[in-house]
Amino acid sequence: MHFVTLGSTSLGSGIVMDYGMDLGIGAELQSDFFIHQLYIDLNYKWLNLSIGMKERWGELKNSRLSSGGLTWSGNSRPIPQVRIGLPEFTRIPGLGGWLSAKGYLSYGFYSDSGWRKKWAERATGTPEYIDKILYHGKALFLRAGNPERFPLELTLGIEMSSQFGGTLHNMVMYGNKQEEYSLPSGPEAYWQALVPLNKAGEQGWENGNSLGSWHLAIDYAINDWHYRAYYEHFFEDHSSMLGVEIKSNQFGERELISYGFKRNWFDGVFGLEVNLPAGLPVSNVVLEYLNTRGQCGSVCNVDAMQTERIDGRDGMYIHSKYLSYTHWGYSIGSAVLVSPVYNQNPDRLSGSTMEGNLYFRSNRVRSFHIGIDGCVTDQIGYRILATHTAHWGTYYLPFDEVEHITSMLLDCSYRFGDLLNWKIGLSYAFDLDSEGLLGNNGGVMISLSRSWKVL
């Protein structure tokens, strides 16, 4: 059950304040009572300052219909943070309106320290976990085009996220297992999270876990139809970020190494979104294909003359010390990769349960997704989501057989009242063929909401 209030008010001098509070009560969740959202946004012209926990969605994607972004999707609980940036594309002066930009810079902290400890204690043996993790995120997007003069726009951007700081518990450190080990969390750690550009061999796990995505989108609008084709490529390190690298062999000779298209650039989300004209029973359609099987290959650049190191097996969302890219057990990136909070079914290799394990059991997937929404009348709306995913496990622990999950969501709503400010919703979600990873599941949600002016 959720209790939500969202609103906006003017503070004068061109400053607008948005605010929100979302409280939840549930059973058999990570906590019986939780604060999902609690934030204040201050907006002045094109600039935004956001403080607190706020739901945020994947960049350049339909928040209602997409399977989500790879660096940030909105799948997990919001991370408390201070965030400043340009929330919408803003035209850069002096260029005739043909170039615009958006982006953000943020710092915060993970609020799931207590849950991480409790979850780790469910595993057999001495619990290994990390708490008090700090968060950093940043992004920059550039858009070329002027829809007022030409219907085509091109967008290119980069988005990055970092886990840094924190305290390790019961982990092996430099050959010895220690009960506690504090990672750097001072001003220098904040700077290194902002600019993770240490020389090769100097960027270690004590500098944090940095990852991110490249974004590319093409928009075309004509006769009240809008089309967007987009691509998001995820990277865990420099090899998957650039796809090429300069390395030395045992003779000191430098050469350019390419990791290949299929092992690197074919990883990512390939999507198409269509926004239809008003008045049709279908409003929006999203089609997506997700592939994460490459990750620079099982072992890339295997060469007898190679002495610097061997790359590959990037381990998407997995880290040796931070364990996984999750918040409260849920993937911060794509929800298609089964989150560690569901590690309660028997493991295919050992037959034992994975409870207390915060690693992703499968990060090598191939997925097809479709989302459709619209309105039958002014009062009746609907949404349909369907996703089919094949799972191969990880490079380190591959599945004996490919696992399949087919998930669906059927959602409908009815608005009523003099101003149509009341809404009742009914949702039914279920999955098929997922017994090996999740077990077969289904659920129903009924919602009732009303909107009104508070301030």
Image (cartoon, rainbow, N blue to C red):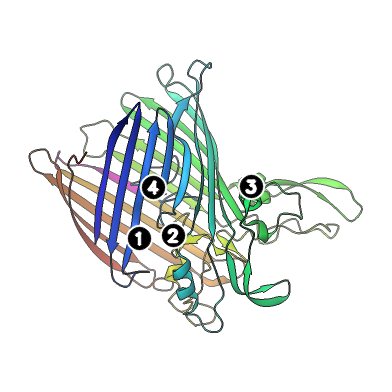
Q: Residues within 10 Å of mark 1 (few under 14, many from 20)?
A: some
Please tell me in which quadrant of the rendered image residue 78 appears: bottom left
Task: Give 18 or 384, whichever is nearer the viewer.
Answer: 18
In the rendered image, residue 56, in percent from the top left (x then y), is placed at: 40, 47
Q: Residue furthest left?
A: 418
Q: Which of the pair 438/110 is nearer the observer?
A: 110
**Residue 130, x across and y down, in percent:** 55, 68
Tell me the magenta residue range: 371-379
Asked whether the viewer can see residue 279, the reply is yes
User: What is the CA distance from the residue labelled 4 to the residue labelled 1?
Assistant: 14 Å
CA–CA distance between discs 4 and 3? 33 Å
Q: Earlier in the sequence, mark 4 or mark 1?
A: 4
Of helix, strand and loop, which one carries label 2? strand
**Which residue position holds label 3?**
191
Residue that numbered label 2 is attached to: 389
* 224, 205: nearer the viewer: 205
Vertical relation: 35 (above or below) 187: below
Mark 1 vs mark 2, CA separation in Å: 9 Å
Give the class, few, some or many, for how many residues have Cα within 10 Å of label 4's Cα (few <14, many ≥20).
many
**Tag 3: amino acid:** Trp
Q: CA distance from mark 1 to mark 3?
A: 41 Å
Residue position marked by numbered label 1 in the rendering: 407
Q: Earlier in the sequence, mark 4 or mark 3?
A: 4
